[in-house]
Image (tube, helix red, strand yellow):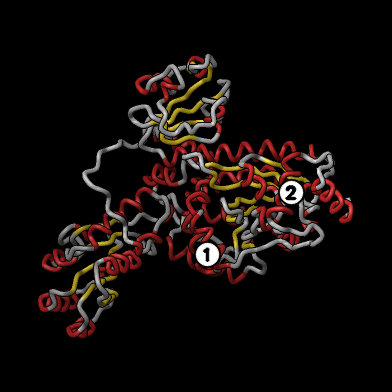
Amino acid sequence: MSDLEHVTEIDRVLRGQETGRDTLVADSWRRCIETYGMDPTRPDPAHIVPASQLREHREQAERLVATARSGLRALFRQVAGQNYVLLLADAKGVCVDFFGDPRFEDDLRQAGLTLGSDWSEDLAGTCGVGSCIVTGEAVTIHQGDHFGLAHTPLSCTSAPIYDTCGQLTAVLDISLLRSPSPKSSQNLAMNLVRASARRIEMANLMAMTRSDWVLRFSTSPEFLEVDPEAAVALDGSGRIVGLTHGAQACLSPESSDSLIGQRIDSLLHLGVDDLPDLMRGRPTEDRVLHLRDGRGLFGHAIAPQTVRRPMRSAPPQTPECFAGLAGQDPAMQGLLQKAARLAAGKMPVLLLGETGTGKETLARAIHVAGGPPRGFHALRCAGLRPETVAALEEAKAGTLFLKGVEDLDEAAQGALLKLLDRREDLRVIASARDRQVTVPGATGLREDLHFRAVGAVLDLPPLRLRSDVDWLIERLLRRRTAGELQLSPAARAELAGRDWPGNIRELQSTLDTAVSLCDGRVVDLPDLPARITSATPEDDLEAILDACGWNMARAARRLGVNRSTVLRRVRKSGLTPPA
């Protein structure tokens, strides 16, 4: 179709003539003219938001991106050979995550198929993301369906992603720069994008409702446990407190009223006390749910993963200075909450952890959270001279950070004791690599100094045992490039699979090198420095599997062994994945 024919068809639609276009497309064209005041004769280019604005959108969508990332990688592997690209846009239409072939980077960016592109309908006209946001339904906007002349070569298939309260929170889009002419050629893309959006909603529901029962259901039993159609989360009284978008169609297709707050026994012949009968102990085909309207479904119940306990008061807010130190890693989140509580006190704190785990960064966060601006005085204990300690006699009140306290010699220990006797306004935070430092007399640390430096203990996990490695990689890369660079899927998988003997410090150095070597806007495998190999302790196997979400391939990369070796060790140790 020529540009003139396209503009002529839009004019015919505006005059009420039938052209064969889908009703959804015709309605969008009318909005573009009558509501947004767009000119169909202008080939407006794609709109890419500034880096600072993209940062804001990505930070707001950080949790969603982290939840969706593994599913998007799997989907991209399925379609990459057919030159598709994936966009994850937020509810405002801005692309906050992107998977595409870096060989076509310039063409993709020119077409707007890239990170930071704004596909809201009032800006880009009729398009996959924008029309999906407006209608709330999965759509294919194929070639001439687009309103703007600059976008008519594209084929874009989009599906909405809803949050646990039923609000549209994002759009998953799969697009082609060029495709076969029939719109039906995108039927497979539609099936893939719908299925991926459903799985992202399911993963989000499971992550957000760990203290509640989750009831998953399907119209047939075959894929009930591995790929259910929909799910609801239920509180202790059986009320629905969260759901996936498909739950409405499964449980109450004739009503548009929200299911949030409704009792499950008003929809099913089922109470909350019956849920244990729907767990994995029974054959799938026997777990039948009888709806009040006479229909039947198959159900699978998942018990609460954490016990809900009544709180005496609202939980304390973690100070902002701790917010950037960890993603959704349970161990790190618990450690930071403990650190936040300790920050307000005066007792000494010992930070344990391998080299490069971020002990000094945490010490500074505790110092900042402790109150008004004061001095932060860091001393490296290896080779510390008594005169260096004495120089702190006139130092500003605040925090004395002892880096590697197990490395203090006798002379430095004596000088520190004299200083601390005179300066009660200096709070001690110490760090150590050797865990024996917690035992008085085990490392050569004098007992009188031991009790001045070793109080509350915070044990920082090594990076190989953290489950938020993806989040940390993304955050550190964003700090270095202000969102201008992104990682290819292969590079991201390689980084996430390393065992990081140098921990965060090694990760920072690796990203600095990769950014320096990268020629374009995508950091790929050749840009990454070679990994540093190390022998990971055998007794870390279960912890590493937990950190990798029991992904055997990723755990094998971190351990530096074959996947079959991991499986053999798992069987030998009698380990089983969490329910």
User: In the image, 512: left or right of 46?
Assistant: left
Q: Inspect the image, locate mark 1, and give the three-letter code of the amino acid beneath it.
A: Arg
The structure residue drawn at horizontal position 38% and vertical position 29%, both measured from the top left corner, is 239
* Residue 40 seen by the camera: yes
**Up-down: is 218 above or below 360?**
above
User: In the image, 292: left or right of 179?
Assistant: left
- Dot label at residue 263: none
Q: Position of residue 130 (x, y in %)?
A: 66, 50
- Dot label at residue 478: 1
**Up-down: is 173 above or below 511?**
above
Q: CA distance from mark 2 to mark 1?
A: 39 Å
Q: Few, some or many C-alpha atoms within 10 Å of disc 1 (few <14, some 14-19, many ≥20)?
A: some
User: In the image, 134: left or right of 206?
Assistant: right
Place residue 404 in its image quadrant. bottom left
Q: Position of residue 527 (x, y in %)?
A: 62, 64
**Up-down: is 259 above or below 16?**
above
- Dot label at residue 30: 2
The structure residue drawn at horizontal position 71% and vertical position 58%, both measured from the top left corner, is 37
Q: Depth check: give the residue in front, 552 or 118.
A: 118
Q: Secondary structure at mark 1?
A: helix
Q: Inspect the image, locate mark 2, and give the three-letter code of the amino acid beneath it.
A: Arg
* Residue 560 seen by the camera: no
Work out whether mark 2 precedes mark 1 in sequence or the reverse, and give the earlier one. 2
